[in-house]
Image (cartoon, coloured by chain):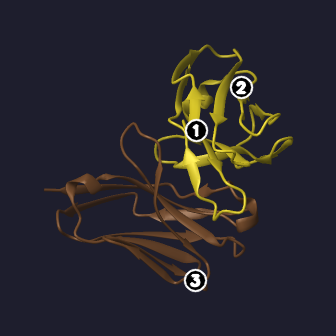
Amino acid sequence: GENVEQHPSTLSVQEGDSAVIKCTYSDSASNYFPWYKQELGKRPQLIIDIRSNVGEKKDQRIAVTLNKTAKHFSLHITETQPEDSAVYFCAATPYNQGGKLIFGQGTELSVKP
Amino acid sequence: NAGVTQTPKFQVLKTGQSMTLQCAQDMNHEYMSWYRQDPGMGLRLIHYSVGAGITDQGEVPNGYNVSRSTTEDFPLRLLSAAPSQTSVYFCASAERGARGEQFFGPGTRLTVL
């Protein structure tokens, strides 16, 4: 089955700096890669996602890149703000197993003012 | 439109007791899943369902049972609670044919003594 590894487990940056979180996956059949943000005591919420036929996707300060050959994908947050502080999770799933997301272990991002 | 709802929010059990965590969604989503979240381990898939009457095991199914008699409801049963099942449980749903975006419920915090 699918296995997703996520690094780093914790990340501390100064406000305004960029943050990068990396994930690798094992199942070449996986073709949908979402990123979730979870604030303390809250449920995970989707922030951006990418499909396997796309190499990069951007939404304002957030971007995701995908390298299918190497089986890794990354989340990039630019101009970080204190409200970006949260735990971020990557995940992977094949299309035809909709709902069956396999998550990475999470990255706790701290943005210091 | 309530989205994904879960009850109860908190529960304390003694070892050996059984209970059912309730999950319901009003978005007519075909896919539903249960995850558990433990510190440092991300979200791990317990069971999932691709439609009424169809369920399958995820990464950590032992000690849990599910059924899906209707599209709306997907209860999770703990047959004989163990301290290792102390965790936060999230239910999620996704639309068939969509990219796999899952919507999470608010979670149930379970403590087994």
Give the Cα separation between the discs numbered 3 and 2: 39 Å
Q: Amino acid at mark 1?
A: Val
Residue at 74 percent across and 31 percent down: it is: B63
Please give left or right for residue A81 compared with residue A1 in the image: left
- Chain drawn brown in the picture: A
Q: Locate the C terminus of chain B and report the quarter of the image it occupies.
A: top right
Q: Nearer the viewer, mark 1 or mark 3?
A: 1
Answer few, some or many: residues within 10 Å of disc 3's Cα (few below 14, many 20 plus, some between 14 and 19).
few
Residue at 54 percent across and 76 percent down: it is: A72
Give the Cα separation between the discs numbered 1 and 3: 35 Å
- Chain drawn yellow in the picture: B
| Chain at numbered mark 3 | A
Q: Amino acid at mark 2?
A: Leu
Q: Is residue A19 above or below residue A97?
A: below
Disc number placed over residue A70 in the picture, else none: 3
Disc number placed over residue B78 in the picture, else none: 2
Q: Are marks 2 and 1 on the same chain?
A: yes
Q: Is residue A103 above or below residue B13?
A: below
User: Foreground: B31 or B62?
Assistant: B31
Q: Are marks 1 and 3 on the same chain?
A: no
SS class of the residue under badge 1? strand
Residue with the mark numbered 1 = B4
Residue at 71 percent across and 26 percent down: it is: B78
| Chain at numbered mark 2 | B
- Quarter assignment of residue A12: bottom left
The mark total stands at 3
Name of the residue lying farthest toward the front: B1
Q: Is residue B5 above or below residue A17?
A: above
